[in-house]
Amino acid sequence: MIDSSTIRSVVHILDSNAMQRALIAKALSAETIETKCHNSWEGLKNHCSPTGSSCLVLEYNYFIEAQRREYNGSPSTCGLLLTECGLPIPFVFIADKPTISDVVRGMRFGAIDFLEKPICNPALIKAVQTGIQKRSQLRKQGLQSASVKALADQLTKRERETMTLVLEGMSIKQIASQFGIGLQTAAKHRARLLSKMNVRSDAQLVQLIYSNNLTPVS
């Protein structure tokens, strides 16, 4: 069973076959996983939310046809089709008698798993739960990054400049020399920087910035 905090998040099902959509939805609903079925990209785009959607079960051939139609089949544009639907969210490919090259290509696209029809329910549930957990982690990371960015946005120009030098590994003496100021003044800039970013050391600051993929702007 998945964590109760993720139950309200929706798993979307996009398949051209109504019976297949119903079977997938039934299997997932038995695990208290909320689902929403679609038979078109338009339907998915109209109901998919970056905040409320956790995973997508996607018919591989349907996806390939849509990709060819809209983007001439270029693998590099795979993400564009999904992004238009309010994604990226983790997705699972399903297909009827996929070839090895289909599976390899699908996994290169970034799928959590590639399942063959008729779908084995335990494999489906395991893949979807993995997608839900991954989406939950990505959501938490996004919230943390937004929080860190909000802290960084409060820094003064001098504090942002100080942070850039700290991230380059400069000592207080080197920072003071770089700015042409005294050691005590440089130390005060650094102390205010660490305080505003809610960290206690240069090492913690470096870890905070880079773990959240933020680039300081001087």
Image (cartoon, grey):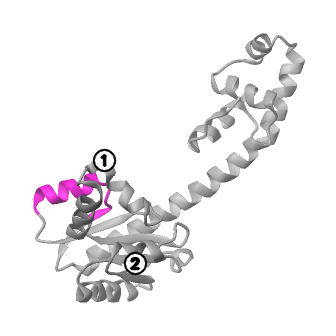
Residue neighbourhood size for the residue with mark 1, other residues' Cα within 10 Å, grouped as few (<14), some (14–19), many (≥20): few
The residues colored magenta run 99-113
Q: Is residue 86 magenta?
A: no
Q: Quadrant of the N terminus?
A: bottom left
Determine the secondary structure under disc 1: helix
Q: Amino acid at mark 2?
A: Gly
Q: Which residue shows up at 54% across the image and 78% down it? A: 4
Counting residues from the N terminus, which is met first, the one under dot 2 or under dot 1? Answer: 2
Q: Is residue 65 depicted above or below 184 in this figure?
A: below
Residue 128 position in % (x across, y down): 36, 72
Q: Which residue is mark 1?
A: 76
Mark 2 → mark 1, Cα distance in angstroms:
24 Å
Residue 147 position in % (x across, y down): 69, 52
Q: Amino acid at mark 1?
A: Ser
In this view, the residue in front, 28 or 75, is 75
38 vs 118, left or right, is: right
Residue 64 position in % (x across, y down): 22, 63
Q: Based on the displayed image, in which of its 4 quarters is residue 186 positioned?
A: top right
Residue neighbourhood size for the residue with mark 2, other residues' Cα within 10 Å, grouped as few (<14), some (14–19), many (≥20): few
Q: Is residue 215 depicted above or below 20 in this figure?
A: above
158 vs 63, left or right, is: right
Q: Is residue 37 depicted above or below 155 in this figure?
A: below
Determine the secondary structure under disc 2: helix
Residue 25 position in % (x across, y down): 34, 85
Q: Which residue is mark 2?
A: 43
